[in-house]
Image: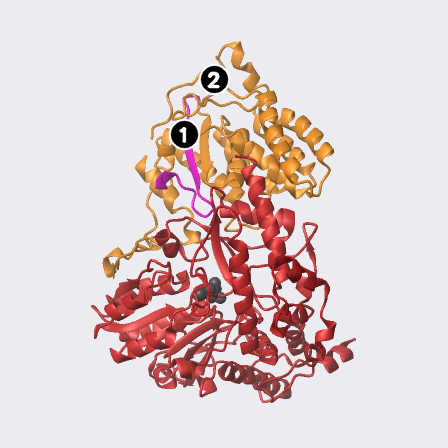
Amino acid sequence: MMMQVAMALKPPSFRILRKNPQRFRTSPTRIRYASLSVWASTESLADPPPSLFLGYSTRTDFPILHQEVNGSKLIYLDNAATSQKPSAVLKAIQYYYESYNSNVHRGIHYLSARATEEYELARKKVASFINASDSREIIFTRNATEAINLFALSWGLQNLKQGDEVILTVAEHHSVIAPMLDTAKKTGAVLKYVSLNEDGVPDVNMFKQLMSTKTKLVIVHHVSNMLGSALPIEDVVVWAHDVGAIVLVDACQSVPHMVVDVQKINADFLVASSHKMCGPTGIGFLYGKYHHLSAMPPVLGGGEMVADVFLDHYTYADPPSRFEAGTPAIGEAIGLGAAIDYLSGIGMQRIHDYEVELAKYLYESLGTVPGIRIYGPAPSENVYRAALCSFNVENIHPTDIATFLDQQHGVAIRSGHHCAQPLHRVLDVNASARASLYFYNTREEIDNFIHALNDTVSFFNSFK
Amino acid sequence: MNSSSTITTSTHFHSSSSCTKILRKRYDNYETRHSALKFNAENEKNKFLILSLKSIKNYGFSPKSPSKLHARNPSLPAEVEFERPLETDGLVVADKLQLLVLEFKSLDEPLDRVKRLLHYAAILPPYDESARVAENRVVGCATQVWLEVEMDDLGRMRFRADSDSEISKGFCSCLIWMLDGAKPEEVSEMRAEDLEHVNVGLYVKANSRVNTWQNVLISMQKRTKALVMERGGKNPPLLEPLPSLIVNHGSSAEAQGCLFPTRLVLPELQTFDERQSLMSK
Ligand SMILES: Cc1ncc(COP(=O)(O)O)c(C=O)c1O
């Protein structure tokens, strides 16, 4: 048994991109044709492009998706909160603990050398995934939140001063707003918020209006976890650099779903979380241009981050070690590496194209539910919309909707403020429901979700 | 808010049969339109009827005096007897808890538990709109819950609650059915774990940020404790909000044509509003 696992899992030591042989054996003929009838009955798409089959061909890689919840087939639509993990990732983590678990950078023995190699290989995989020029520009953190806090405590406290301005949008996640409020309080910097325009998305023109020589930092999302909208991030970076400000991009909702190229975006910093991109929890990263990182002070002191320690002082190591005090999340980093291999095996462009189609289908289907209000932009040829929809149905609390969908239909969606309370206040609601997709979701699931939602709405309305 | 000194003697309450009738009607509406639902309708109706009679027979409230918490008074005339037949030697709460747990335990289908909660939501006394204020908010719930707590002249605890979610309202209604009119000790003795079987939509016993049961119960208990201490001439506990728990950066930020988050209450700061409400009393 152990032998078998070990053989099946022998990790690719030096190849960064690993094709998933099993998946590519999936020829179009193996696709479940039962699903075709769903298309036929719901719309007149005569010949769906092959990319539309991605959901069916990848589902088999995710054991968790094949279960019943409350007596119904699970429909997992809470991917913006966290994604599921393919077997390849689970096996990579198990293989690490079974065969070479050891501390990194600390032993000359075989296992330690092996663990160190794989841990650093994971860093290289992240770097190449987002096209960073150097893997030393990747700092492993617990998650995106920790990455933002690290940035705020290090770069923020070192560089922001009284009267400096920081630009954010009202659509930021709490993980951006809370650390920046703290930083502003400590430094006297002023936070300026870009608000929504009449289309209900962040007002791009306001960026330009707000930017001045006082602007020192622009810290914004790439794709909004509530609105599903995307900022023209390359333009924002150009405008910011024009006034001498630096930019941190919260790419939590973009890195898992599309090709993100930090050199093309030219952002100074960028953060994301492993758990939203098929990797394990407990690991995320801060990307930073090396000249910024090497000028920044550490936030935590301890092992790994030092160069020399004396009884009265110490010198710290170069990045990335400088920011990774203590034993890191080795197994998790390796799991993230495996997730990146898996995603790259499918191809991020393919994932993106598939999700764009799903996003349109979700938006249009949801629009047919009576009394619904969907937040964010309507997707079109020119307007990008991520494969997620936050919505409210007239006179029914989103938490009641989510509870009923779960209990009665096995549909998992999120309800609440999605860590974006300020945005909800701007939209004048206390909470919303959110269905968020990933490449392993299918049109059939969307159809079933809409059916379940209609049932939910009638159920609660029958109690009115 | 002062401890209630008015003892409401109104006996206006839904009789269990009328309540059940209303619910059955709604329920039938839903049923006929949704024949696909997966449970045995006949069984469900029978169970529903029997259990409802059992569980709501003690449920009394006074919609005529929405701003006053309704108080039970042992010296009331016989007509109110119906409201409190179980009130014997402090067993009230324990008995009610047992009944409620049995009631929900007997419902195997999740849908039935949801329906039962909605039924409880429907019989929760109407809540005064003006009491839907920030000081009364139970923070930490995934939905908005408002709670008012008073102690009457007999030292019994009086509760009123409301929520923008029907399911949360159902939770509140159950809690109030059990704890309204209870002695402070009885309120403090109830444990969130006891309510496990009543839970709808939550499988985790652990304290979850979205566990309405737990948040409302804890809030009831904290405010009860504060009122007891106040009665005893002691300072209520936690009078001062811990400064570290308040995140207010209004001065260092500017709103730009939008609402600005002057106070970002993180979920962990559950007790902030509770403390505020204690201070304002
Ligand atoms: C846009 C955005 N930013 C930041 C975060 C925080 O990610 P994490 O909780 O993994 O640190 C999330 C996740 O919910 C997110 O969607």
Using the image as rendered, state which of residue A315 and residue A72 is in the foreground. A72
Chain identifier for the orange-coloured part of the image: B
State the residue position of label 1: B150
Q: Residues within 10 Å of mark 2 (few under 14, many from 20)?
A: some
Q: Does the stretch in magenta take in A361? A: no
Q: Position of residue A228 (x, y in %)?
A: 45, 63
Q: Amino acid at mark 2?
A: Asn
Residue B148 magenta? yes
The quadrant holding residue B266 is: bottom left
The N terminus of chain A, quarter of image: bottom right
**Numbered range of the magenta stretch:** B133-154
Secondary structure of the residue carrying numbered label 1: strand
Farthest right residue?
A: A1
Q: How far, Cα to Cα, is label 2 from label 1?
A: 15 Å
In the figure, what tint was chain A given? red
Q: Which residue is mark 2?
A: B73
Q: Residues within 10 Å of mark 1 (few under 14, many from 20)?
A: many
